[in-house]
Amino acid sequence: MGGYGLYQTKDLIFGTTLNILSPINGATVADNHLRIVGSAPRASAIYIDGDKVLPDQKGSFVWEYILATGLNVFYIETKDRFGRKQWRELSVVYQEPSDK
């Protein structure tokens, strides 16, 4: 198979990948405004807790959310055009700043 043929089948062979760049899973934060930043190259769909997220042309995405006090858990899923899925569970703890 030539190089061009291999390039054309990369989506079929490799599928999508899901990378969460921030926040770190299990992080404790003092700001209730959360930005989940990640990338999912070759994904045809990205969902965070059921909300469809629109990536840029390279597959990078940003999703914003207002955290509740305590543990917040997010389910992040990608699908490629062949229906293959990748998913991650992301946990973030919001601890309100104490007034001193």
Image (cartoon, rainbow, N blue to C red):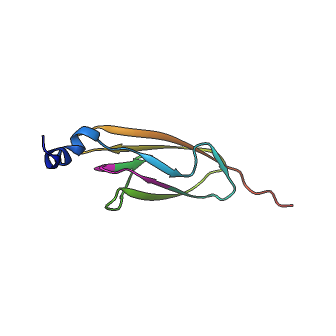
Where is the N terminus found, in terms of image quarters? top left
Residue 84 appears in which quarter of the rendering? Answer: top left
In the rendering, at what x and y percent does residue 66 appear? 57, 57
66 vs 39, left or right, is right
In the rendering, at what x and y percent does residue 42 appear? 29, 49
At horizontal 76% and vertical 57% (from top left) the residue drawn is 97
Q: Nearer the viewer, residue 69 or 12?
A: 12
Question: Residue extending furthest right?
Answer: 100
* Residue 28 drawn above or below residue 35: above
69 vs 1, left or right, is right
At horizontal 37% and vertical 50% (from top left) the residue drawn is 40
Q: Decide whether residue 38 is among the magenta residues.
A: yes
- Over which residues does the magenta segment extend? 37-45
Q: Nearer the viewer, residue 40 or 51?
A: 40
* Residue 100 drawn above or below residue 17: below
19 vs 25, left or right, is left
Question: Residue extending furthest front?
Answer: 2
In the rendering, at what x and y percent does residue 27 appear? 63, 47
In the rendering, at what x and y percent does residue 92 appear? 60, 46
Residue 14 appears in which quarter of the rendering? Answer: top left
Q: Nearer the viewer, residue 3 or 65?
A: 3
At horizontal 18% and vertical 44% (from top left) the residue drawn is 6
* Residue 43 drawn above or below residue 54: above
Where is the C terminus found, in terms of image quarters? bottom right
Q: Decide whether residue 18 is among the magenta residues.
A: no
